[in-house]
Image (cartoon, rainbow, N blue to C red):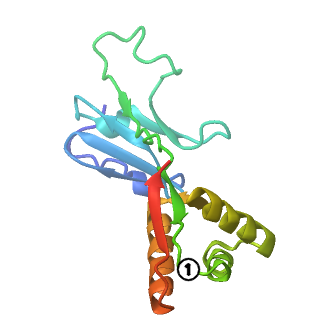
Amino acid sequence: MRSSTEERPRFSDLPFGACLSGPAILTCTTLDVTIGTIIYPTMSNLFSHVEISATSSNAAAPRMSGDQGNGDQGRPGGPSTSVITKVKPKLKRPNLYRVLILNDDYTPMEFVVHVLERFFQKDAEAATKIMLHVHHHGIGECGVFTYEIAETKVTQVMDFARKHQHPLQCVMEKK
């Protein structure tokens, strides 16, 4: 047991990493990676209870002296440790939207093919096939995109059609 006048060791002096301590929380970092936050219910002689272990399987993990990885078993009344880990939120896939071209009686077929080639990177054969589908069925799918990309494509097509004085309609719908 150390006396209160004796200088306590600092983790920043250890070769394995640096630690920042607060009134009840100790956060250890090693090689710019946060290991975890350890909460100590009693802060008396804190540094005499913590040691840094550097092994290949458990590099610089803070643990209690004499702890064999089994928690506080066999040590009633001893300081307990809790490790708080951050859980990464599960990411979900973004919603997809279909970009559709609508048929009209005034826009030339060649212009629709040109739009499909220019804004949707379709080759001449695929663009012609889509254009004929629009011509016969009244609507055709140009592609499936995330919301922002679909919205941009619709705006580009509509602006391009207006610039060339064609009433071509392009819309998007959730897939």
**Above or below 67: residue 43:** below
Q: Is residue 41 above or below residue 110?
A: above
Residue drawn at the location 36% of the way across and 40% of the way down = 37
Q: Residue at x 44, y 66 (%)?
A: 148
Where residue 106 appears, x then y in whole percent? 53, 79
Q: Nearer the viewer, residue 81 or 123?
A: 123
Left or right of 8 on screen, residue 41:
left
Hey, which quadrant is residue 49 in on the image?
top left
Residue 29, percent from left and from top: 45, 51
Q: Does 13 sit above or below residue 155?
A: above
- Which quadrant is home to the N terminus? top left
Q: Who is closer to the viewer here, 111 or 148? A: 111
Q: Which residue is mark 1?
A: 107
| Rendered image quadrant of residue 121 | bottom right
For the point 66% across and 68% down, which residue is it? 131
Q: Report the residue at 53% width, 62% height from top.
A: 100
Q: How many marks?
A: 1
- Looking at the picture, tell me which residue is in the foreground, 96 or 25: 96
Q: Percent x, y for residue 92?
A: 48, 43
- SS of the residue under disc 1: loop
Mark 1, other Cα within 10 Å: few <14 / some 14–19 / many ≥20: some
Q: Is residue 61 above or below residue 108?
A: above
In x, y percent, where is residue 157?
A: 51, 78
The amino acid type of the residue labelled 1 equals Thr
**Left or right of 121 in this view: 97:** left
Q: Quadrant location of residue 83?
A: top left
* Residue lying at the far right of the rendered structure: 125
